[in-house]
Each structure stands twice: as C-alpha cells, then as structure tokens.
Image: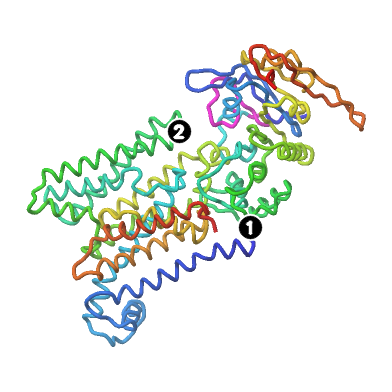
Amino acid sequence: MTTLLELKGLACGYGGRTVLSDIDLSISPGEILCLLGPNGVGKTTLFKTILRLLPPQAGSIHLHGESVAAWPIASFAAKVGYVPQAHTPPFPFSVLDVVSMGRAAHLGAFATPSVKDMKIARQSLEVLDIGHLAHRPYTEISGGERQLALIARALTQQPEILVMDEPTSNLDFGNQVTVLNHIRALTRDSNIAVIMTSHDPNQALSYATRVAAIDRKGSLAIGTPPTVISEAYLFATYGVRTQMLRLPQPDGSVRLLCLPLGGMEGHGLCAAS
Amino acid sequence: MTTKDAATSFRWIWAGIGLAGVFLSSFMIGRFPVAPHHVVAILASQLLPIDPSWTTEAATIVLKVRLPRILSAMLVGAALSSSGAAFQGVFRNPMVSPDILGVAAGAGFGAALAILAGMSGLGIQAAAFVGGLIAVTATYAIGSWRGSQGDGVLVMVLAGIIVGTVFSAGISLTKYVADPANTLPAITFWLMGSLASVTSRDLCLVALPILSGLCLLNLLRWRLNLLSFGDDEARALGVDVRKIRLAVIVAATLMTASSVAISGVIGLVGLVVPHLARMLVGPNYRILLPTCALLGAGFLLAVDDLARSLAAGEIPLGILTSLLGAPFFLALLFNIRKGWAT
C-alpha cells in the first residue's frame, strides 16, 4: 500500500509547552486510523497540528512524500478535509449552503460556487443519504444530521484524507452507528483515508483498521485494534478493569468487544446500582 | 438550484423596486414643488436630448440641491448596512454593528477636534476620516498582538470597546473645553448626524472610498459565510482567514469612516438593515450582501426624506434612525427564535 500521509518525528504543543513529541505515524488510502487516549493527553493538539492550525514544534508532515510546510492553505485543504464536532453557527444557513462551503479550497478568493460546485455538494449529500435535508436550516436539524452534513461538507472538498474530531460525541446510539457505518462505507467505496478520535474502545475495535493509542505518559502505541487495545492498556490508561470478549459472527469472522468490569480502583464508578 | 431556493434568492428584487420607488419620490419631497413627470424628464435630460418643459428653478432644485443629498443618503445607507452585515459575519455575532471597532468614536473625536480648532467643512471631514482610521488601526493592532494566542475575534471586539471608550472620553473632553457660545453646539449637532449640509463636492469626495469598499466586500462576499464558522474551521476549509478578515475590516472601515465624515454619527442602520435583509433573502452572503446595500440605501433615503419633511426645520438624521430603528429592532428580537430563516 502507498503511504498517503506521514508524520515524521512530529512534536506538538502550544507556545513553549510541548504536549506530544516524537510521533511517527503513517496512513494509507482506505484506512480508518482511530486515535484513542484519555482527556487532556493531547489528541486535539495533535489534530490541530496535522491540520496545520498549529505550527509543529519539531518534525514534519508529508503528503504523498512531499513536506506540506510551505503549501498554501487552499492546496492543503484540497487534500485534507476536517470534520469538526457538530456545532451551531450564528446564522441559519441551509444545509446545502453549509455543504457547498466545502468548495472553498477549489475556488478563487473572489469566486462563488458554480452550478458544477453545487452539483458536487448535492452528490455529497446523496452519498450520505441526507439529500432530503438540502433546504432545511442547518441550525434546526438533529445532532446526528448535523454531523452527517459536516461530513458531507468535508466530502465536497474532495479530499484524500478526512480528519474527524470525535464524530460520534453527543450523538444517540442510533446516530452513532449510522455515522460510523457511513464512514466505513466511504473508506471502502472511495478509498478515502480517515483519522478520527474516539473515546470508545469498542468503536475502535469494530471500525478501525489501525489504532494509535496515547497513554498517560504521552507515548504512542500503533497497531491493529486487537494488538493495541488490551486489558493491560485499558487498565494502565483509564484505570478500568475490562474483559475482552471474542464473538464469532455468522460469516465466520470473529469480533472483539471489551466489557468494563466492576471493581474500579480509585475511580469509584459503576460500583453503585 | 431548486425552485424554492431560486424564489428566496430572487426576493432581492423587492429591495431593488423599493429603492427605485423611494429614489424617484424623494425628488418631490421639499418646500419647492416639482411634478413627477418633470423629475423624470429633468433626470433623463442629463443623458438624452429633451426640450425643457420645466422651469430652470425646478432643474436647479432637482439636480443641484436634491440629487446630491439623495445620492449621499443612498451611499451612506448602503455603506453602513453592508459594513454591518460583513462585520456580523467576520465577528460571528449577529449583534455587531459597523462601529464595533471604534470607528464612529474615532471619527467623532477627529471631527470634534477639527471644529474646536475652527476648521471648516473639508477640514472637519478629513479629520473625522483620519480619526476613524486611527481608532480601527489601534483596535486591530491590539487585537492581532494579543489575539495570536486564544480567541482572536473576542480579543478584537474587546479591544474595539476599549478604544471606543477612550475616543468617547476624548469627545467629552473636547466638548468640555469647547466654547458654549459657538463650538460646543457645532460639535453636538455634528455628532447627531445629518445630511442637511451635503454638497456635490462632498459626494464626489466620499464616493470613491465607499464604492471601492462596497466592491471589495461584494467580491469577498461568499467567503464571509465561511468566516462565520470560526477561524479554525474556515482555515481547514482552505480560507486564509487573516487576509480575508483584514480585507473586510479595511473595506468596512473605509466605508464607515467616509460615511461618518459627511453625515456624522448615524446609529442602528448597520445593525437593523442586515437583519431585515436576512429576513428577506436568508443568511447566505452571496445574496445577502447586495440585498443589504439596496435595502440600506432605500432605508436611509426614506428616513432622510422624513428628516427634511416632518418638521419646518430639519430633524437630525441620527436621531430619527435611532428612534425608528429601536422599535424595529425590538420587533426583530421577538422573531429571533424563528432564526432569521425563510
């Protein structure tokens, strides 16, 4: 497999403070790389650095083997799309307006989207089965629909990589599954690579092709989900005792699930009820 | 585009028709009566060879007295409304008005100083313009110096409030030392805002900065949508946020400072008209910004007609826009939960 995005010896942080350092990571087309780690360990800082919203403190970021340090903002955005957590803008733009904003990286500073650009935006909506929302105000649709609209906007950028910040946070159970299934379908059908953060090890076990797990000391373990997500890692990182379950599927494959057990040490969760 | 979108986006036509109507009827308002067909003929005679069937007084009134004032009201209205709408997007807040960065206070201080120094019309306008630019430059400098770490937008708005306060104190100080017999009333009247003394020379002076600001904003208008999603998101979508924001601030400041220089401080137009326009055509700046210019031009022209016709003497325009704008804005507030949407 070819390498799409590569981080070489990357260090990131704000101002004089380094949060994560010596990160070596690469991602290929069609992969879903899931970034796991406790709150405050630096996932968001790493994302902001990958998206070039923060300058790297050391090391470099490469796309197709080429360093992106000197790339114009728009050329980078044409390759790497960002899906933020669902939010509310100050004005009630229609969903189609929001999604068509994904064309910015392909348009000149004084341009407005053409008929062709609007067609690309509509296709992105159709890919995610939310074409019927096109004319609804973005501020009035549900959280799950908003998350899908933001993914559609990123697809409208026609990127090779999607960077997703906790795409399932604040979504109900049904919407979480819908959004994740769409993400998996995207990587299979259009060979897009996805880097996403998640708080749920089971999501990583079910959907990720690889996992990058940050522990409390800020060091990174990278590998396939079953090798990285272990009872030992979960206990060391979250202080939670878990049991890994192997569930044979009708098609012969085996799915792994992690089940949190009672008896938290020092966390006092779960013991009640 | 579907029919529904097309129908909404074509509603700007109403703003255009309204403006044309107010424009033509404005020539008939005033103590000297001019018949409607004479107004049209006099205006047309500037472009077409028409035998005059009207008196020379009528032609002078229409072309030399009323036309400069009408065009000034339209320019100022379009400038304030478009800058207000642009700032609301750039600062991601629907309650922002064009003087958020201190331009009105800076221009007011410049004008007050010039009046105190005994300067005349052109001197006052130049001082107001320069004062407005200085205030916004100070705000922008503080904002970019402190804003590099943390929320740049919030820091810039707060810097604008502080700079505005300092310049307002400057205005009060000038008033305090002004001569109560002549300069003090002149300063006070100037600050109330009026187009009563506008001449065609004033119009020519401000037309260039206002029209170029209007052009620049309209060229960038689609990008304003993206800025309203926040710096990080806009950047990740491929927008050079700093450059676009600086261009918008420069354009809006040129327009507002020029407006204040000829008309004094005219409140609420830059806040109310963008919301009206949003109710008419929706929030997409692609259509919103041109609609704002049309609507703002029509609105200020209509209010200026009232200012010169309601009473025997002139009512200061700034007082009327605030008196009319306030209940209007309250009515809008009650509609906010409908989300300004269509």
Chain for disc number 2 = B
Q: Of circles 2 and 1, which is in front?
A: 2
Closer to us: A235 or A118: A235
Image quadrant in which you'd find residue A23: top right
Question: Where is B161 relative to A196, above or below?
Answer: below
**Position in image of residue B43 (x %, y %):** 33, 77
Q: Please give the residue where the numbered disc 2 appears in the rendered image.
A: B151
Which type of secondary structure does the marked residue at label 2 adopt?
Answer: loop
Q: Residues within 10 Å of mark 2 (few under 14, many from 20)?
A: few
Residue B264 spot, x, y in % from top left? 25, 55
Mark 1 = which residue? A115
Between residue B16 and residue B118, name the one nearer to us. Answer: B16
Q: Quadrant of the N terminus of chain B?
A: bottom right
Residue at left offset 32%, top offset 72%: B26
Q: Which mark is residue B72?
A: none
Q: Is residue A44 left or right of residue A202?
A: left
Residue lying at 53% horizontally and 36% vertically, measured from the top left? B232
Q: Badge 1 local density, few (<14 within 10 Å), some, or many (20+)?
A: few
Q: Is residue B39 left or right of residue A6?
A: left
The residue depicted at 77 percent of the width and 28 percent of the height is A209
Q: Which residues are magenta?
A: A50-66
Judge whether residue A86 is colored magenta. Answer: no
